[in-house]
Image: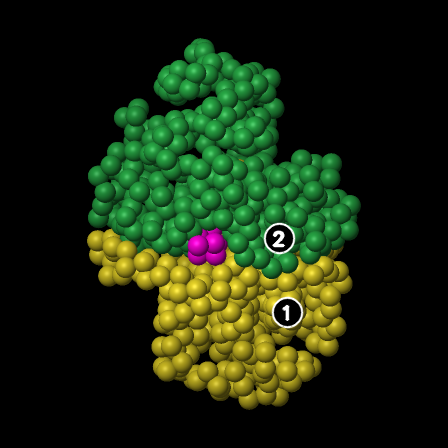
Chain colours: A yellow, B green
Amino acid sequence: MYTYEYLHRFTHDFFSGMGCSEDDSILIADIFLAAELRGIPSHGMIRIRDYYQLWKAGRINVEPNVSVVHETPSTAVVDGDGAVGMVAASRSMEIAIAKASQVGSGWVSTRGSNHFGIAGYYALMALKHDMIGIALTNANPLVAPTFSVSRMMGTNPIAVAIPAGNQPPFVADFATTPIARGKLAVAEKKGEKVAIGFIQDKEGKPTDDPAILKSGGSMLTLGGDYEHGSHKGYCLSAIVDIFCAVFSGANFGPFVPPSVAYLPVLDKKVGEGTGHFFGAMRIDAFQPADDFKAKMDEWIMTFRSSKPAAGRDRVLIPGDPEREKESRLREEGISLLPAVAKEMKEIAKELHIEFEIRD
Amino acid sequence: MYTYEYLHRFTHDFFSGMGCSEDDSILIADIFLAAELRGIPSHGMIRIRDYYQLWKAGRINVEPNVSVVHETPSTAVVDGDGAVGMVAASRSMEIAIAKASQVGSGWVSTRGSNHFGIAGYYALMALKHDMIGIALTNANPLVAPTFSVSRMMGTNPIAVAIPAGNQPPFVADFATTPIARGKLAVAEKKGEKVAIGFIQDKEGKPTDDPAILKSGGSMLTLGGDYEHGSHKGYCLSAIVDIFCAVFSGANFGPFVPPSVAYLPVLDKKVGEGTGHFFGAMRIDAFQPADDFKAKMDEWIMTFRSSKPAAGRDRVLIPGDPEREKESRLREEGISLLPAVAKEMKEIAKELHIEFEIRD
């Protein structure tokens, strides 16, 4: 078990060791640890090795010039200049927030970035400004459009955070696929089958074998099959891809560069790096802030008091599970998979930083 | 079979007969007919009787003062003043477009409205201005949050239209449930079962019986069950509800007034009427317009040329099915269900307007 502080210090030292500035190293560590605390370890310490390998392959710019390349009062395109995704993303969200302060809302599409961790982090940044926050990103192609067997899209997540008053905020952060890629990988390692509706084989036939992704299979969009609305999940994933990449001039769809170094970068590029999209809207751009918060409290209490299904003890509000997890893990500490801790130990040795394997 | 012009003239005369202005009557007819042409008859002529009954019940304001009640350079709240939904919605979208012209993007949340027909119509309004269009609405509560059996949300649709160059535009318009309410009603009338994953009984157990909605059952969100990501559909539907109703001060969730007069309006109100949300973003707020369109063409051609699954002849781009339907129906004409034509004939008689029943 590790404390938050221990893993934060390690992550800071790791990025600092790669050459990132002090401020950037702290920021990146904040975001890596937010993934662990919120119960999304697939976007936490397990990604340290990916970033190390990308850096060794010369695909990370540790001294980036993240800059606005096009703008209007309420919109901007930001060039991430090959930065660590967390750096490009948080500067982009800050720009969206600054624009919202000026004209009510701000919308930023970002190119030339890399894997940015959990989308929810950037949406959450808006809350302390009494703003609604939105964050989207495209990702490695693993997912097939409805009626197709080609891997054309990532699990392209959507995060939306909305402030409340006395209630905790509404925080949705979800992939546009039925299941996360990481859960399929775990099932595959354990030799387990998965439910029908997550993946298909190279012909497009439903399968329960997660290993199929290694032999031409692909992930399905939210909805699963056409009868159950997979075309709606396809629409969502496509909208995320277009907002992130066509708006900004990043690589879209099948051309998104892999976030791991062991997969080759395609010869064909249609833009720069990975793309993100961020939005911020002042709540007082719609209602006086106190009225908005009181109404949001009422919304949350209404939904929380809806009747649970048989065998369920309560109805959740988006954000509840992650917040409860965070409060528990801050107290109990964070455990790492042995394989992840081992990777971190090896990297620590190469970079001459300290890391201890613990149970 | 009816021509577009015949049904447009009837719809115009019907709303004009209720007291709507000439301009409003034409606009409303445009939107009713857009639903028929785009293959969404559940939002077309079948709704004439609902509007007639709402009007007779004194729940429609035919001379509304649709007005901005709160604004910033990029946002506004519009009060629909009890207007026909199409009138409140199209004026709101015009305001979003005007704001986008000025500051790059415009975002409008609307209260005091009624059923606005197809969301796609308003998203499509943005295209001729070289803008991306977004339209959301909340609706009668029929849908249960994940882990709940309470009917808390509507089928809350999302529409997004994105301009292209030589390719037709990308137009997504979909409910945040696996299946439309109308399709369940049709199955019920035919005495047919439906697939598992659409509905649950009053305990929360999955069922294939569409009649269950009359005995405490509820619709499920996109994803179907928790294992297949229904909590993501719940997030989407909740976001639509909050953007439409908490932002504007409309009724949210279970308090949305029914769009049919035979259901009672609840004693408890938490706001005014039904809520909508509209967005417009200039494409040149992100890229020079020609570059944006060329890139969007490339996105569309890339996805259209992905490999079809076995037994499928092609991969569709969102908007393809509706556009193809529209082009066919403009040529072949529009057929109405006999029960719908009969209702229209009766209403025509009461309002002293002309309507002929045809095969």
Magenta includes B226? no
Magenta includes B245? yes
Residue B258 rendering spot, x and y as whole percentages: 35, 40
Tell me the element at label 1.
helix
Give the residue drawn at x 40%, y 80%: A330
A280 left or right of B146 in image: right
Placement of the C terminus of chain B among the 4 image quadrants: top left
Q: Numbered disc 2: what chain?
A: B
Q: Which residue is mark 2?
A: B106
User: Magenta segment, which residues?
Assistant: B239-249
Which image quarter: residue A184?
bottom left
> What secondary structure is the magenta-colored segment mainly?
helix
Give the residue drawn at x 49%, y 45%: B80
Q: Which residue is mark 1?
A: A98
Residue B344 rendering spot, x and y as whole percentages: 41, 19
B251 left or right of B266 in image: right
